[in-house]
Amino acid sequence: MAGNDARVIKERIDIVDVISDRVRLFPSGRGFLGLCPFHSEKTPSFNVSREYQNYHCFGCGKGGDVFSFVMETEGLSFTEALELLADRAGVELTRAERTPKEKGKHSLYEVMELAQKIFRSSILAPEGEAARAYLARRGVSLSDASRFELGWSAASWDSLWRQLKTSGVSSQDAIDAGLLISSPKGQFDRFRGRVMFPIRDLSGRLIAFGGRLVDGEGAKYLNSPEGALYSKRRSLYLLHAAKSAIKEKNRVILVEGYMDALRLHMRGYTESVASLGTSLTEEQARLIKRFSNRCFICYDSDAAGQAATIRGMYTLQTAGLDIYVISLPTGKDPDELLSGERGEELFEQAVQGAKPMILQHLQSVKPLLDEPSTRKQGLDSLFEGLLQLSPAHIAPYVPNLSAEMGLYPNQFWQELDKARRQSRAMPDRYMMEERKQDKKRVDAKPEDAPHPLEAALCALLFRDESFREVCDMQEILPLVADARLKEIIMALSVESPDELALRWHTMGDGFPLSVIAHGDRFCEGLEFSFNNENDTDPVGAVIDGLKRRRATLRLKYLDGRMKRQEATPQELEEFRSVAMEVKGGRFS
């Protein structure tokens, strides 16, 4: 049963390890703290508890257990999250018998894996001779091809589709997976006569393919279209394989193409990933930041590659990364350099000589600055980039910048300020980012967030079996004002926490477990305050706090009635009685 499977998975998996794949966590008190993955923030407010195996963000209110986190971050259903975490934990799931209607159906991820199996089989078959010959010319052995799961799409129009159809895949699923194209003339394979590079997400799920043409006419590289599985701006090739090395070496090497990243891994630079194009996005930058703050960009050394490097490094900087630029010999990309004579030695020298972002930009425009006719073009390029950064990021490099510009440092700041004022009509990227982050921070707190005392009561009922057995619902429920939390409390009075958690996950209702995680953090604070006090009963403290809150709210209501001269004699008497309760700290 799914409930038993979920319990076993939770026993074998540490939520801190799972969340650390996406969020850089630091020890803090009894738990861990990091930047929330669900909203933008600069001060960490995302709390993870190893003790309770849950998380809660004090900024946006998101919270839950390990299944909640995977469902939220990966966009999965509970069943899909269960399968993903079961694979990670080494748990064999209890499979329910599928109905006749369900049999033969495939998820899009299953369709992609079927296609990958076909591509892998094809590259080893006689029809894959052209692919094997191409890889041999590029210095990629069959064992390397296996390591990186490279495949071959046959050159015929419908080879893949015929095999998928035989496996029970519908044409619509094949289209939705980006493998099949439908036209007025019929349906045909998207990838034909290409070496296939599988693209996996952070969790290792196959979401897309890239195909390299070997012979004939057509685009050299063809990628899967964006759709239900794949978003280019949110993907980095080989990140799933590189994430451990990135954390271990505390750096990522970012290149442009499949072969660049593949070659770097083959040469031992396993912290390398590819952006699959020269345009970097903020989503990709945030992916990198989960594992390291240091990013070494290494794009092609041609003019287009250098221009892309400059654009990309400013995109990454806005995510808070420290950017270094690796400069390669003219006319070389990482794959070509590493494949040539003394390639590894030369590449390592380039890595060691990588320049901080601003200094690299300064070097690239220096020829323009040295010529009077192009000086303004060089200055405009520099200021356009620098305006995207905060003064704190610029300050360490002002001596270099001012010297190359022929200015004193104070004159440099004046020129930068002048450029900023001239661009006010179109706010610079740094200011726009700051305003966007400020708005997100303001909007992060949900208006309907539960009261912490009420959330704490839910958490205590969820965690403490003895409390559930003795509590009087007729006494407890009137203390709770939030109808949503009353439903949680009533559910806990008739069902076990494990059963409820399973039902909530299956229904896709993340609110109850978010409330419980919020309550757990509040109770941790209570326990901390008890360290130097005799009263260490969190249940008593929470109930007493709820009673005080109810009495205080009632007192406020009655006071308003009195001030408006609307109070009845009975309400006047009640006001005196409640006021004495609040003053004496004794509540009925």
Image: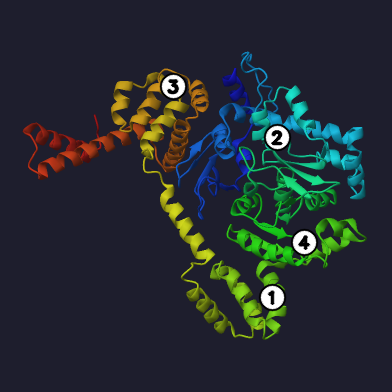
Percent from the top left, x then y, of residue 479?
30, 30
Give the distance between the C-alpha atoms of the residues marked 1 and 4, in whole angstroms.
17 Å
Badge 4 marks a residue whose secondary structure is loop
Percent from the top left, x then y, of residue 236?
69, 48
Circle on res. 185: 2
For residue 233, above or below residue 454: below
Q: Earlier in the sequence, mark 2 or mark 3?
A: 2
Residue at the disc numbered 1: 365
- For the residue marked with disc 2, what is the amino acid? Lys
Q: Nearer the viewer, mark 2 or mark 4?
A: 2
Badge 2 marks a residue whose secondary structure is loop
Residue at the disc numbered 3: 466
Residue at the disc numbered 4: 300
Please give left or right for residue 560 compared with residue 262 in the image: left
Badge 1 marks a residue whose secondary structure is helix
Percent from the top left, x then y, of residue 269?
80, 52
The residue lying at 85 percent from left, 46 percent from top is: 214
Residue 467 occupies quadrant: top left
